[in-house]
Amino acid sequence: FTVYKIKKTDMTASIIYNGELRCDCTHIQSGTVIETDAPTDNRGKGERFSPTDTVCVGLGTCMITTMGIRANDMQIDLSGTELAVTKHMFSEPRRIGKIEVLVQFPQHLNLSEKDRFILQKIGDNCPVMKSLHPDIQVEIEYRW
């Protein structure tokens, strides 16, 4: 990859536009590939995650990952936690207007109010959350 003389070791990902509103995104460190497609309401086929979908999924995965890091330190296993992410697009300008995240913890977890508070605080303040534009409404529901 030679554009602008960026060293591959400094890159996070490389992206190739394949035409027909699709991209292949390669994570440099692991070689993992994610394909994206434009959504059906914006001329795409909707057969892959759209770029705006990946932003919303990034929020959910960042929340549970950072909570998982803290939970490990607290000797708590969050395995089996499920998240449901819903994206709402706004128009003029077309953008993500609202993201809803439902976090459903396994029923076997029996956490104190203090532990729940700590983990929710971590989820509410994950790096992706802090990176979103303040105009994006984010609604989070934690179900213990």
Image (tube, rainbow, N blue to C red):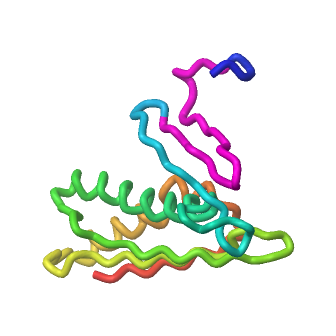
Percent coordinates x, y for residue 129 in the rendering: 55, 61
Q: Quadrant of residue 66?
A: bottom left
Please give left or right for residue 122 compared with residue 111 in the image: right
Residue 12 painted magenta = yes
Task: Find residue 55 and report its image quarter.
Answer: bottom right
The x, y position of residue 126, in whole percent, is 48, 57
Residue 137 percent location from the top left of the image: 64, 75
Q: Is residue 131 magenta?
A: no
Q: Look at the picture and state if 111 lies above or below 33.
A: below
Which residue is drawn at the image coordinates 74% and 69% (left, top)? 42
Quadrant location, the C terminus:
bottom left
Above or below, 26 relative to 132 = above
**Lateral position of residue 22 relative to residue 103, left or right:** right
Position of 70 compared to 31: left or right?
Answer: left
Region of the chain picked out in magenta, as a range: 6-27
The x and y percentages for residue 105 are 27, 75
Identified at 36% across, 55% down, the residue is 65
**At 54% from the left edge and 62% from the top edge, which residue is drawn?**
49
